[in-house]
Image (cartoon, rainbow, N blue to C red):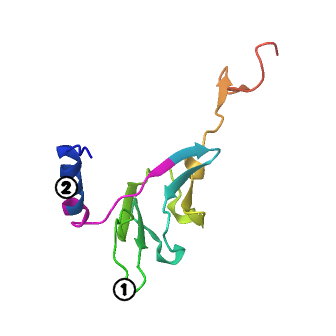
């Protein structure tokens, strides 16, 4: 039997065990805008939804979740890649977002957070007055043929 030695694999394993135990873990996410709100999808497989904590402090949105894994009594781990522990992600919210109306849901291991855009930050039409304010044109309205 031929054994291949990979020094980087052992180094990665060692660094992961040392750094992973030092603090909270992060979680992968997707962020996109649709209409007048942003949607943040965060992968949290194996997480009890009751352990998820979302809070906003000033302009910082913090997501915390806890994963607990157990083995039946008397069992011996052969490999353990799904690490238990605390997962934390912090995001800074811009001024144009409405933190008071944030909503969240959890389905199939994905936490979805909806962050609305403030009314004052939404695009709007500005009327342009012509000839000292007697006639108004709506910028962006109509076509060039009108």
Which disc is residue 15 wearing? 2
Please say if 39 is above or below 87: above
In the rendered image, residue 22 lying in the magenta stretch gets the answer yes
Q: Is the residue marked by circle 1 packed among few (<14), some (14-19), or many (20+) residues within 10 Å? A: few
For the point 48% across and 70% down, which residue is it? 47
Identify the mark nearer the N-term, 1 or 2. 2
Label total for image: 2
Q: Which residue is mark 1?
A: 74
Q: Is the residue marked by circle 2 packed among few (<14), some (14-19), or many (20+) residues within 10 Å? A: few
Instruction: Indicate the quadrant where residue 124 lies.
Output: top right
Asked which secondary structure carries label 1, the reply is loop
- Seen in the image, is 140 located left or right of residue 7? right
Please say if 10 is above or below 81: above
Which stretch appears magenta?
18-30
Residue farthest to the right, as pictured: 146
Q: Position of residue 138 (x, y in %)?
A: 71, 28
Classify the position of the C terminus by image quarter: top right
For the point 41% across and 57% down, which residue is it? 27
- Seen in the image, is 15 located left or right of residue 93? left
Asked which secondary structure carries label 2, the reply is helix
Q: Position of residue 121 (x, y in %)?
A: 55, 46
Regarding residue 134, the answer to whether it shows in the image is no
Relative to the observer, which residue lies in front, 105 or 12?
A: 12
């Amino acid at each position: 039997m031929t054994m291949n030695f990979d020094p980087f694999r052992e180094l990665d394993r060692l660094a992961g065990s040392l750094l992973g135990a030092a603090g909270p873990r992060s979680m992968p996410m997707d962020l996109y805008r649709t209409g007048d709100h942003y949607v943040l999808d965060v992968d949290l497989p194996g997480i009890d939804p009751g352990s998820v904590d979302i809070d906003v402090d000033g302009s910082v949105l913090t997501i915390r979740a806890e994963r607990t894994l157990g083995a039946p009594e008397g069992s011996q781990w052969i490999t353990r890649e799904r690490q238990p522990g605390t997962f934390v992600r912090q995001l800074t919210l811009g001024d144009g977002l409405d933190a008071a109306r944030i909503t969240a849901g959890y389905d199939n291991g994905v936490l979805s957070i909806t962050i609305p855009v403030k009314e004052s930050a939404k695009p709007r039409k500005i009327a342009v007055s012509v000839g000292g304010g007697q006639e108004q044109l709506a910028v962006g309205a109509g076509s060039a043929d009108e």
